[in-house]
Amino acid sequence: FALTMTTSPPSTYNFHKQTIETPNLFIERLSLGPTHPKRARLLHIPGNPGLNQFYEEYIKRLMDNLTKEGDFDEEDIEISSVSLAGHWTKKPSKNGMHHYHNDYALDDQVSYFVRVLREFYLPDEGIDIYLSGHSIGGYIVTQVVHSLLPEEQARIKKCFLLCPTVMGLGDSPNGQRWYMRALTFNRFFLRSIAESFFHYWNKFLPYSVREVIFRAVHGSTENLDPHVEDLHSAYILGNALRLTTSEFQQVTLLKKEIFESLPHRFVFLFSNVDEWVPMHYVDEIQKELKEHQNDMEVLSVKHAFCIYPGNNEIIASTVAKYMKAL
């Protein structure tokens, strides 16, 4: 098949930002490490709003933690993040991806990442594959692994679920606040009005002013990841809220059968101040999945850890601890 790919120059940390397009697949990908690693590849699936650029700091700190004590050499592993389907900064060409559309529901995201794995990760034989997923990305990881063939599942060494929303999303404290808002946004003319508002917001309001507002909205006195502004763009906001509606409808009961069929394959890293995954959810998951209790930790991080520099180090060092113990 025809393949077109554009790659930006590497950053200080040798990040590679790629746009990959085949007749059936479009990918925006951020990676760190060699293209052909000796030992392992880790694919991270973002949480909603689904942009891989939010995870640069997480990827960098994970690589630092894996290599600083010699457990992994810099040539041993590639760490990458792929944006959610439709949550792209560029649009695919009509000729390249004939089934492109804006509205990717949760099931569409699962199917998309199954194709990503099969086309770009699993063919790399002799290499261990790790998966990492944040928030709804953690749910997507569980569904993707469940959808693979047994011989494909055997290639997945470990799955790291970071502040994962795997049950009761609509009943969580934040779910109760946001469900009707997301549903209302996707009806009538509100989406068009909001998109117009954010178009002029980004065009005329200086970033220094927007940053103050961002920090107030996110309840933080810390410096936020500069990519947080992308969350407030018209296009990403629309896609994020449409996906949120799908999440509320599908993420209800804990799918125990997935975890029971793949024992000791998942690591759960929870937040101790999470209003998407409150502590009574954590208690219920620990009770229902007793065989995974040794692979569960509650950390002092926020749900949106990726936009807080200190939180990235806590998550990354914990993931690295498990990877180095294998």
Image (cartoon, rainbow, N blue to C red):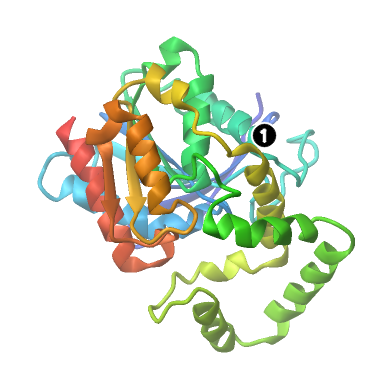
Q: Position of residue 187 (x, y in %)?
A: 85, 56
Residue at point 67%, 86% (across, down): 205
Q: Relative to 140, say whether 233 is above or below.
A: below
Residue at point 52%, 86% (across, down): 212
> Quick one: quadrant of the C terminus?
top left
For residue 193, side relative to residue 178 (left or right): right
Q: Position of residue 168 (x, y in %)?
A: 54, 43
Question: Which residue type carries mark 1?
Answer: Asp
Residue at point 62%, 62% (across, down): 177
Element carrying mark 1 = helix
Looking at the rendering, which quadrant does residue 107 occupy? top right
Furthest toward the left, the residue is 69
Residue under circle 1?
108
Closer to the camera, 40 or 175?
A: 175
Q: Is residue 10 visible?
A: no
Within 10 Å of disc 1 (Cα), the crowding (few <14, some 14-19, many 20+) is: some
Closer to the camera, 107 or 211?
A: 107
Looking at the rendering, which quadrant does residue 252 occupy? top right
Closer to the camera, 93 or 190?
A: 190
Q: How many marks?
A: 1
Q: Relative to 72, say whether 181 is above or below.
A: below
> Quick one: quadrant of the N terminus?
top right
For residue 82, side relative to residue 299 (left or right): right
Q: Position of residue 32 (x, y in %)?
A: 36, 48
Q: Position of residue 225 (x, y in %)?
A: 44, 69
Q: Is residue 26 visible?
A: yes
Q: Relative to 140, say whether 207 is above or below.
A: below
